[in-house]
Structure formats: structure tokens, C-alpha cells
Amino acid sequence: MHKLCQLRARKKGKKNKRRTGKVKENKFSFHIKAWLRRKLLEVKQQMRRRAALRFCNWALTCIHICNILRT
């Protein structure tokens, strides 16, 4: 639990005991969302890396062809 949430819970005391079930559910869904977001970021980074690699390969082949044509 977040520090602020803990503090608030301490202040409220008995009040938040009723909502524990909801809190658990929210926490679970939040974790799933966070995980999905992380996965998406990873995929994006991989795509960027792959695109960069493809571009590098393409550039290298272009240079190679140019060198062949020059000679």
C-alpha cells in the first residue's frame, strides 16, 4: 500500500474496514493494469530497437551497393 494511503487508513481507523473487499479488488486490477502498461512499454521499446536495427541494416546495404557501383 502507498504511504499516503496507509496514513489515511490510520486516521480513519474503523471506517475503512467495511471497504476492504473493494480495496483488494481495486489493488488487483491496478496491478494487472500496471503489468500491462509495463508489457506495452517493453514491446514499444523492442519495436523501436528492431526498427533501428532494420534501418541500420538498410543503410549498410545501401553503402555497400554504392561502394560496389563506385569501383
Image (spheres, helix red, strand yellow):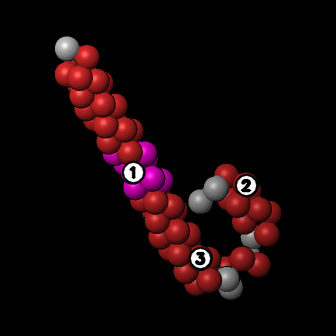
Assess whether residue 45 is covered by the magenta stretch: yes
Q: Which residue is mark 3?
A: 26
Identity, as a three-letter code, of the amino acid under mark 3: Asn
For the residue carrying disc 1, how many other residues have a C-alpha within 10 Å: few (<14), some (14-19), or many (20+)?
few
Mark 2 and mark 3: Cα distance apart in space:
16 Å
Which is closer to the viewer, label 1 or label 2?
1
Is residue 24 in view? Answer: no
Which is closer to the viewer, label 2 or label 3?
3
Is residue 26 in view? Answer: yes
Closer to the chain start, of discs 1 and 3, is: 3
Q: Quadrant of residue 6?
A: bottom right
Horizontal and vertical percent position of residue 9: 72, 65
Name the residue: 28% across, 35% down: 57
Specify whether 60 is left or right of 52. Answer: left
Question: Which quarter of the rendered picture does the N terminus lie within?
Answer: bottom right
Q: Which residues are magenta?
A: 41-50
Q: Which residue is mark 1?
A: 47
The residue at the far top in this view is 71
Number of marks in the image? 3
Specify whether 40 is left or right of 1. Answer: left
For the residue carrying disc 2, how many other residues have a C-alpha within 10 Å: few (<14), some (14-19), or many (20+)?
few
Identity, as a three-letter code, of the amino acid under mark 1: Met
Name the disc covering residue 4, or none: 2
Mark 1 and mark 3: Cα distance apart in space:
31 Å
Horizontal and vertical percent position of residue 71: 19, 14
Specify whether 51 is left or right of 16. Answer: left
